Image (cartoon, grey):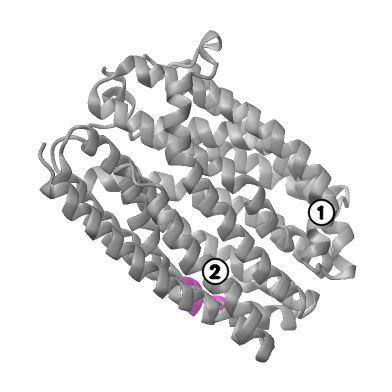
Amino acid sequence: MTKEKSSGMDMLSGSMLGKILKFALPLALGSILQQLFNSVDVAVVGRFSSKQALAAVGANAPVVALMINMFAGISVGSNVVIANYIGRGHPERVKNTVGTSIALAFITGLILMGSGFSVAKPLLEIMSTPKDVIGLAVVYLRIYCLGMPFIMLYNFGAAILRSTGDTKRPLFCLIISGIINAVLNVFFVVGFGLGVAGVAIATVISNIVSSGLILCFLMKSEEPLKLELRGMRIYKEELTRILRIGVPAGLQGMVFSVANICIQAAINSFGSEVVAGSAVALNFEYLSYFLISGFNSAVMTFTSQNYGADKVKRCRRAYFICMASGILSCVALNSCFYFGRDLFIRFFTTDPVVAGYAAQRMRYVLLFQFIAGTYEISGSALRGFGYSMTPTLLTVFGTCIVRIIWINTVTVKHHTFFALMIVYPFSWVITGSIVVAAYFIVLKKMLNSPV
């Protein structure tokens, strides 16, 4: 078993801070770059098309998340299972899990492509998408769905590489595909006037590139990570372990997306200018969240490997490092965005009304986003221990059920943008409190267990 040392890192010994930063920061940077390139979608249609086109792209964000989160969550299972096998020193099981993961990615991608294309319009109608937006939103979503198989192949392939600590090659894939996406956005929208269709086509092409690159890296990797065509099949035992970890994570993501769709439907009720302003502010939330997400993945992978090697105290140390790093970095970036909001918002829109609503969302949501790190990082640490359903149930209650109740009570009584937006920090505080408590209960059990 040498591959994890040559392409990744030794997570089982030595100082952890440097290794965690080396793992998390390229991952966070990759996601941030990907979102920056995706933000070009919003900026291009906002500056060169119309505010309806801007709203159409923004209104689809929670819909896309709903469609892919279940199966993207399953890729978390691949990461945990492979990392755990590495910690235990089982190369053959690693190889079987790699083949199972890629086969599963292709199958789920095809399912998403077919189902997404057929439910696009009904789902957007259920969300009360404004009449001057829904036609463009349906066009964007249906074209976007054509790239689902490639999105899944990238997600699972990147999860495989990250299980060894290799975050540089997934970053390279995102940089290349992101540049292509940005260039094609301008080409299709500005050059040919294709509007939201051009943005969607550019996104599909960039996803094809990123998935192709990640598969090439896997096929050229050393054993046991090397992907071989004859090994691309479902191994029952590995599939069971992947699903045991991944399905709860995917369900959490799906239910979370349902809650966000309810919020988006409430936003839609305020009209296209509010939808467009919210879509602009959401870009900054994504960028800041990815800092948390990088340490999120780090704590899960480090915990899984060290738990597999019976090094629970290193798991605890990884948790504290990732929690502090994730929250502090999120606070720093959010502060930059908020205090420079006038400049940043102008990249996306020159409409003063749209800009005003974007600034409001940044004030009520962005400044408090660091709180989300408490439950995200704690939940991933629990998954590294093999407890996947526990954070799922707690997060579903704290961020999903609470939000849906809020929308149907507080927002109904006080139909204002402020009353809607404040649900985010409120639900983050509740969820963070209960998931952090659950982590320390499980950690205590692990520390007291005989090796």
Residue 324 visible in this rendered orientation of the protein: yes
Going by the image, does 63 lie left or right of 18?
right
Name the residue: 71% across, 62% down: 58
Q: Secondary structure at mark 1?
A: helix
Residue at numbered disc 1:
196
In the rendered image, the vertical position of residue 166 relative to residue 200, given as above or below: above
User: Which residue is outermost to the top?
Assistant: 230
| Of pointers 2 and 1, the one earlier in the residue sequence | 1
Q: Residues within 10 Å of mark 1 (few under 14, many from 20)?
A: many
**Is 441 in front, or is 100?**
441
x and y, in percent, of residue 207 in the image:
65, 37
Q: Which residues are magenta?
A: 335-341
x and y, in percent, of residue 354 in the image:
72, 78
Q: Residues within 10 Å of mark 2 (few under 14, many from 20)?
A: some
Image quadrant occupied by the N terminus: top left
Which kind of residue does numbered mark 2 sit on? Ile
367 inside magenta stretch:
no
Which kind of residue does numbered mark 1 sit on? Val
x and y, in percent, of residue 173 in the image:
53, 35
Name the residue: 13% across, 49% down: 447
In the rendered image, the vertical position of residue 84 relative to residue 336, given as above or below: above
Going by the image, does 431 lie left or right of 328?
right
**Is 81 in front, or is 10?**
81
Q: Secondary structure at mark 2?
A: helix
In the rendered image, the vertical position of residue 382 relative to residue 12, given as above or below: below
Q: Which labelled disc corresponds to residue 367?
A: none
Going by the image, does 395 lie left or right of 298?
right
Name the residue: 36% across, 50% down: 380
Residue at numbered disc 2:
401
336 inside magenta stretch:
yes
Name the residue: 11% across, 49% down: 448
